Image: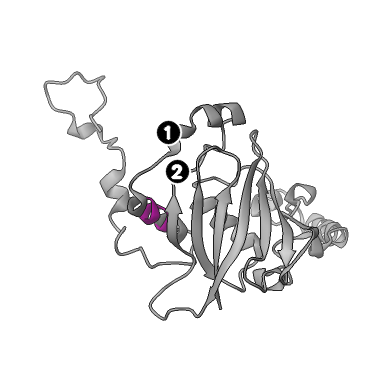
Amino acid sequence: MIYEFRVAVRDIGVPIWRDIQVNSDETFYDFNSIIQAAFSWSGFFEHRFEITRSGGSDLLPIIIEETPLDTLEDYTDESDFREYSNEEREDVDEIEENEYDYYDENDSAENEDQQLLKYFTDIDDAATYIYFTDAVLEVDIQLTEMVAPQEDCSYPICVAAENASPDEMEDRPTILQNRDKLKLTDTQDLIRLINFALSQLGDSDIFDTEYEDFGSEYAIDTNWDDVPPDETEDSPPNF
């Protein structure tokens, strides 16, 4: 089953939204990556989901937080083992096992039980996505359609969108001051760029052919060998 969500940034002063189709069995961990790509954010800040309507009924928010990775020290990096003896490696393995004993997997949006289809079962089921930037960006999520997957389509995919997203590094006064700059008229170009970003998540290759030369076409030319002879050696090339 394919879910279509309207995801809309709240309280910016201009309408900023995306209609995104995703597989219903996606985890909230993956859904976070999809939202980040759709709004051209980096995932640098913490986030959480709050389920506010499920099964057609309003409810007190069910909070699904991101995995608190900073509470788990990663002992799997081979660079950590370069100077360890076999006995020391065994000690590290034991520490790693004990650390995971304190970790409640049910708190993780990556847990297999935390799939979208568990909470989104009826049209208009809803959630809030909170991205803890300086501006604390909030995104309203609403299930608008449930459709059968198309054989010639890969998911996730953006089917409609309006306006550019706010810069995650700006505070709220700056975002509100510059909100008119977020207004876009070419929605089709916006949708193409969003789908290019979604295709980079590894779950969709529908736009790979169209954008196979994307990098070379838009990349900044840093090849100093192309500087014309009449330009000084210290001058960067035009781009």
Q: Is residue 156 left or right of residue 119?
A: left
Q: Earlier in the sequence, mark 1 or mark 2?
A: 2
The crowding category of the residue bearing disc 2, from other C-alpha atoms within 10 Å (few below 14, some 14 to 19, many at least 20), is many
**Residue 92 covered by magenta stretch:** no
Q: Position of residue 8 (x, y in %)?
A: 56, 51
Q: Is residue 171 visible?
A: no
Label 1 residue SS? helix
Q: Position of residue 144 (x, y in %)?
A: 56, 66
Q: Amino acid at mark 1?
A: Lys
Q: Position of residue 56 (x, y in %)?
A: 71, 70
Q: Residue at x 11, y 21 (%)?
A: 230
Left or right position of 221 against 150: left
Nearest the camera: 207 or 20? 20
Q: Is residue 161 visible?
A: yes
**Residue at (23, 29) in percent of width and height:** 237
Q: Residue at x 67, y 66 (%)?
A: 125
* Label at residue 190: none
Residue projecting furthest to the left:
230
Q: Which residues are magenta?
A: 190-195
Which image quadrant for residue 91? bottom right
What scheme was used to colour the molecule? one colour
Around disc 1, counting alpha carbons within 10 Å, would you say few (fewer than 14), some (14 to 19), or many (20 or more)? few
Instruction: Report which residue position mark 2 lands on.
Output: 164
Q: Which residue is mark 1?
A: 181
Mark 1 in CB contact with mark 2 (< 8 angstroms): yes
Residue flagged by tag 2: what amino acid is it? Ala
Q: Position of residue 108 (x, y in %)?
A: 75, 60
Which image quarter: residue 99?
bottom right
Front one among 64 and 75: 64
